[in-house]
Image (spheres, rainbow, N blue to C red):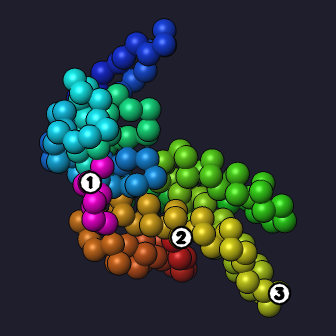
Amino acid sequence: MRCIFFRLLVNNHWKEAFMFKIGDIIIYGSQGACRVEDIGVPDISGIIQGKLYYTLSPIFVDGKIFIPVDTTIYMRPIITKEEAENIITQIPNIDTGIVENQNYKIMEDHYKKLLATHDCMDLILLIKSIYNKQQNVKMQGKNIGQTDEKFRKIAEDLLHSEFSIALEIPKSMVSQYIASSVEQLTKGSLHV
C-alpha cells in the first residue's frame, strides 16, 4: 500500500491516521470502496478554504465525495488479495452463535455495531448469522424480518465490493467464488 501512516494530536489525544495518495483505493465509511481522485482544496462552495480534502469516487456507484483529509469518518486501505483469501479460509470456523432475539431494536443495534467496525470478518459474521437464522425460520415455514434482510444486503454489498477489488473479480462473482472456496475447504456449501 502506498499510503503514509502518521499520528495526529487531536483534542490532546493521539489519533493514528493514514494519508492516502491519488489512485489509492480505500474503504470510506458506509460508502465502501472509493478511489482517491485528488487531494487538495476543491474550488466549490461550502468547502473550508485552506483545508486539504480528498476527492473520492465510489467504485461501484457514480458520484464524487469531498471529505477533509482529517475527517473522523472511518477510512482504511482496501485489503489485499492474500488477506481476502485468508479471510475466506476462516469462514467455516466463524461461530455465529444464536441470533434469535425478537427485539428488533436490539438486533438492529447489534448489526449496526458489526457494520461500524468496517472489518471483513465482522461483515461475514453478520451475513453468516442472518443466513443461519434464515435457515432456522425457513424450517418453521417463516421468513426472516425486514431488519435482518436490510442488514444482510448492506453487509453483502460492502463485503462483495471489497472482495471484488481485492480478488480482481466482478462483484457479481464474489458470492460464487466464496461459496466455491468454502466448499473446497469443507466439502459442503455456504452462502456469504
Mark-to-mark CA distance, 3 and 1: 45 Å
Mark-to-mark CA distance, 2 and 1: 23 Å
Using residue 186 as the reference point, say whether residue 162 is left or right of it: left
Q: Earlier in the sequence, mark 3 or mark 1?
A: 1
Q: Nearer the viewer, residue 54 or 80?
A: 54
Give the main secondary structure of the magenta stretch.
loop
Which dot, 3 or 1, sits closer to the camera?
Answer: 1
Residue drawn at x 63%, y 47% is 113
Q: Nearer the viewer, residue 66 or 192?
A: 66
Highlighted magenta segment, given as a residue range: 57-65
Asked which secondary structure carries label 3, the reply is loop
Q: Earlier in the sequence, mark 2 or mark 3?
A: 3
Q: On the image, numbered disc 3 is attached to which residue?
A: 140
Amino acid type, mark 2: Lys
Asked which secondary structure carries label 1, the reply is loop
Amino acid type, mark 1: Lys
Residue 153 lies in the magenta stretch: no
For the question of whether residue 2 can be seen, the reply is no
Residue 60 lies in the magenta stretch: yes
For the question of whether residue 156 can be seen, the reply is yes
Amino acid type, mark 3: Gln
Residue closest to the far bottom: 141
Residue drawn at x 40%, y 66% is 160
